[in-house]
Amino acid sequence: MSGTVDQSIPDLTICDREPITRLDRIQSFGFLIALSNDWTIARASENTAEMLGTAAEQLIGCRLDTLISRQALHDIRNRMSILQATSSERLFDIGLITAKKRFDLSLHYSGDLLILEGEPSLPQDRMEAASMVRAMIERLKRAKSVADFHRDAARQVRAITGFERVMIYRFDDNGDGDVIAESTRSNIESFLGLRYPASDIPVQARALYLANPFRIIADVHAPTVPVLPYRGQPEQALDMTHAVTRAVSPVHIEYLTNMGVGASLSISIIVEGRLWGLVACHHVEPRCPSFVMRTAAELFGHMYSMTLESRLRGDAATDERNARALSDRMMTAIAGDETLLTNAEWIRDIVGGMIQCDGVAIFQPGKLTLNGATPPESEITAIARYLDTTSPSRVYDTHEIAAIAPRCAQSADRAAGMLAIPVSRTPRDYIMLFRRELLEEVRWSGDPTKPVVQTEDGLRLSPRKSFEAFVETVRGKASPFSEADRRIGEAVRIAIIEVILRYSEAASDERRRATERSTLLIAELNHRVRNILTLVRGLIARTGQSATGVAQYTSSLNGRVQALARAHDYVTRSSWGPASLLALLDDEVNAHRRNGHDVLLIDGPPIHLHPTAISTMALVIHELATNSAKYGALSTEGTVHVALGIRADGGLDIRWRERGGPPVQAPTRRGFGSVVIERTVPFDLQGTAEIRYALSGLEADFYLPAKHVVAADRDMAIGCDAIALEEAPVGAASTGINRLASTSILLLEDSMIIALETEDMLYALGANRVTTASTIAEADALLAAGRFDLAVLDINVAGQVSFDFAQRVRKAGVPYIFASGYGDQVALDGEETGTIVLQKPFELEHLRQALLMSLATRLA
């Protein structure tokens, strides 16, 4: 495809791309100096010779603080101390160099440069601007209507500036502007009631009106003054967004010339941060009011905007009250008669009193109720299809239905505009309010169509050359819906949705929620039961390895299972919420009390732990108490002192100290109890554990991260499409049993006891190396650092789901299976469809089959 540009097509965006703030030129009524942070003059306008008596070439490179008077330097420095990055400061009647030649100054920053602008001071215009503006605003506040408010504002701006025509110019939603108020000299043509197209003010000009709300063009035809040294390119030019003297773009000069304007002044009307409109001032001849007068006009513009915003907010508050009153009336009526929800005549009567409409349609799939002037039924269905593509949680309005449903143009005489109120999500139901076509004659300020002209940049749109009233007849459109209409429509939407939810959806919604709760409960219960069974089986196996006889085995196993049972009781009593660590300590340690006296001392605040942490700490504390009763302080007349402390990060320190018992020696053989004490907290809870066998008594320090000290979110229910191992074809893994020999296997499991049990099984199956991770982050690091032949992945790992990690394992080319406590409730979808799921607790043979099937799938 060729990269050439068709020069026959006008560039409609050239005005929007014109560098209007980087022209490197200023108007001739003032001068400009740009200073670096050491007061060195970096740039200066070419007219400093006539303004200050020194040529710009001589000023550049000099320090301004050595050229101006001490008083001027003092005044400028004072204003700099309060100058903000996006604001400007003014100084009036300053003897900049000599006391005789005085200037009005403006200061602002442009990047790293301080911009100093000045113009000769006019002593005859000195005034107290604040008091004058205060009087003007007080006059505005007395205006009885909004029309009087705008008209009086135009009159006062004309009085203070002396311009021949002052217009209040308001933007509509399309960007077009209407002249809503005007004050003119007797023999000046009136533009009141005319409309200006949005293209008259390009995009970057609107942004500039927001950034710098005041603009003066003193002489449209006067030559501009370059800022030296000349840069040449816009990106190198000085950004004069906030400059008072900034030159005017050639396109805008052409526009004003075509309008017959010799000077102009504009004040932005900004309401709630948006450009609401402009105060536009025109003069046939050049005119530059003094800086003092212009500052007063600018201050008045700010106060005018604030007062207008206050009025509009008051109107909006009134609309809100009316909307709430309507909502209350509707809810009261519908509560007594649910059939009113489908009564179009009643809807039209009650809503039509606040939103002007000529017809109402109530649309429900398969049912339509009409009243008044509406489009044909077939067209309403087409409209509803379009509305289904819009937001279901806000009203939609248009003053031209044909723009969204072209066939509706044939019935525009009955319904040309519409406000649609969605009153449900699924299926979509709507209340549609229609307005008839409004034949309108729009009086444009000249033909809004702009001619195309040839420029150095190619063809572009040229400003209009005629501004005589151009009348256009508009058909097929209704009067637009106002913001107040939309607010009332939103109140109706909320009221009806509340009633519909109450009467129509309450029962089915409750059934749905009950089903969801039941499904979630079953999945969660299955998950927890399977994990507990696997944990108990691990305890049975590990206890048997260290027991020396049946009696010891039975006693040790019973104690550990009872510890788990007590922990389970704590969390179930609190609806599987946080449980008391103090109660757990008291139950385990004071079980060994002597003569009815407590042997446990606890220092620290009441602490509650997450259920997972309670279960883990139940085993740890049980082993500590049991060992103490056999060999430590609890075997004699000693005591156990436990100190609890919360760290700044929210984590918990637990310090176990035994005192008053026999001398302690480190054990020569590490049994299962020692493994539980030393490894469970780091593995299961990602905390720390340190055991010291001091002569005076055992000392144990544990740290639990903050996430275990507060209630955690419930484990999420998994819903995927799984292939259970039992469904595998018989004999699928009957061959190649030796494939598991010398394999390297990654095990992701957050329960230490389950992990130990699974490790033993994998080694029994012939694995050469089993690397265990208790978190997904740890597993990611292991996967990146080493090569694995197989992976066994728990689905729920410390509250996180491992599906994303499984995808990374797949990309690494490692076959894997899931080992889950969710049982039959798990259903895998997407890329996980078909993955083998081994249900906990599992046997050695089940694990063997699953791993071999996983290997076979990869080889296939």
Image: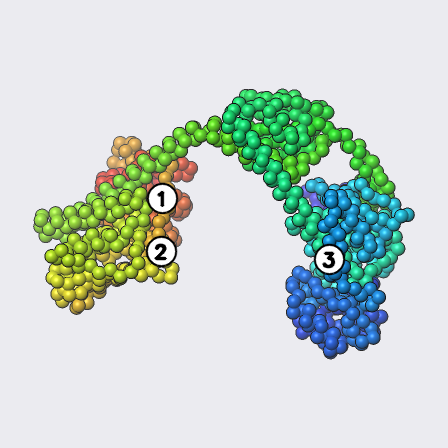
Residue 704 picture quarter: bottom left
At 29% from the left and 35% from the top, the residue drawn is 725
At 36% from the left and 39% from the top, the residue drawn is 717
Three-letter residue code for mark 1: Arg
- Image-based side of 125 in relation to 801, left or right: right
In the picture, the disc for residue 134 is 3
Q: Which of marks 1 and 2 is nearer the N terminus?
A: 2
- Image-based side of 746 in relation to 420, left or right: left
At 47% from the left and 28% from the top, the residue drawn is 503
Helix, strand, or loop for circle 3?
A: helix
Q: Position of residue 541 (x, y in %)?
A: 18, 47
The C terminus sits in image quarter: top left
Q: Which of marks 3 and 2 is nearer the N terminus?
A: 3
In the picture, the disc for residue 815 is none
Query: Front-most of 858 and 44?
Result: 44
Judge whether residue 296 can be spotted in this image: no
Residue 852, above or below 210 = above
Q: How far apart are marks 1 and 2 (CA)?
A: 17 Å
Residue 412 picture quarter: top right
Query: What's the coloring here?
Result: rainbow
Which residue has dot 2 on it?
Answer: 706
Residue reaching furthest to the right:
187
Three-letter residue code for mark 2: Ala
Question: Which of label 3 and label 2 is nearer to you?
Answer: 3
